[in-house]
Structures are given as C-alpha cells and as structure tokens.
Amino acid sequence: MHRRPFIVGLAALAALPLAAQEMASGAGIAAGPDAPLSALERWEADPTTVFDASEVDLGDFQWIARPVVVFANTDRDPAFGRQVDLLAEAVDDLVARDVVLILDTDPDALSDIRRQLRPRGFMLALLGKDGTVRQRKPAPWSVRELNRAIDAMPLRRQELRDQRSFRSEGG
C-alpha cells in the first residue's frame, strides 16, 4: 500500500515555503543532469507524490493526469484535515486513476491554480485530463465518490475499454 509515502509527502509540504525562498534567491538552482525534476517527472516517478500548488503548472499534467486540488485558507481547517485523511485512506485507488494530488492552504500566496479556480474557503476541485473542471465540492469528498466521478468521465471509460481489450487480446 502507498499510504506511508503519501503521508510522508504531506509532512514534507510543511518545508516548501523555505525551499521556495531558497529557489527564488538562486540557491539550489542546478543545471545539466543534476537539475531538479519537474513536478510531472516527480509524479511519474512516484504517483503518490503530493504537491503544493505553488510548484505545479496544471498545463504540465494535461492529457497525462487528473488533478485533484484541495484548497483551504489554512492547513488547520477541519475540512482540509478530513479531506487529506480521506484521500490517504485509498491513495492506491487514486493512483490507478492517474490522479495527481495538489494542496493549497495559503490564499496570500495566490498560486496560479488558486487564481484559475478561485476557491472560497475549503474546496475540492476535480479536473479531467483535458484540464476542464469536472467537479467543485465545498465539503470533503470520499475517494469512493471521487472514483465514481472519475469513472463516469468519457476518457476514463475509454481507458477502461482499452484495458479490457488489451487483456482479452492476451497482452
């Protein structure tokens, strides 16, 4: 199960503001083969990676992953804590559906994602692989409800048909 790396990833988000300051000041900028991985590359290496909204460009994930963005005005928001717990309980289901998890608990930072989606307080947003917003929820949503919403998307249904076809052909 992938729950442990997911929770470790959530804990690592606390260190992001410091890392962002170092990057902005030029410290830690590498060139060549030692260059830091992009958010997409990090997600492809470990699909349980949880991102802070400040480090993600939604366009990088278009046609590759389904972003689930959780917004709150603070990480102490009870709805935010509940949502993170719900997501952690079934992270493997999200990985199977190509979900990239993005968190934004700093309205003052005004991330590009926050500007695009304009949440008010707590909000969960589910985007399709095409980048369109499929669901906006003002309260925590279970992974089961997310799975149903994702599985109803036309592209996901096509992915499932392709998987069944591949298996039936002996692949």
Image (cartoon, rainbow, N blue to C red):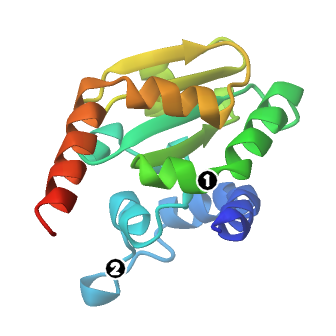
Name the residue nearer the viewer: 51 or 137: 137
x 57%, y 57%: residue: 92
Name the residue nearer the viewer: 39 or 89: 89
Q: Residue 58: give x, y in percent of width and height.
A: 35, 39
Of tags 1 and 2, the one toward the viewer is 1
Query: Looking at the image, can residue 51 be seen?
Result: no
Q: CA distance from mark 1 to mark 2?
A: 29 Å
Label 1 vs 2, first from the N-terminus:
2
Q: Quadrant of residue 110?
A: top right
x 45%, y 45%: residue: 99
Q: Which amino acid, by three-letter code, is at mark 1?
A: Val
Q: Which residue is mark 2?
A: 35
Query: Looking at the image, can residue 126 be seen?
Result: yes
Q: Residue 112: give x, y in percent of width and height.
A: 43, 31
Name the residue nearer the viewer: 159 or 122: 159
Q: Which residue is mark 1?
A: 91
Q: Quadrant of the N terminus?
A: bottom right
Residue positioned most to the left: 169
Instruction: Identify the element where label 2 is drawn.
Output: loop
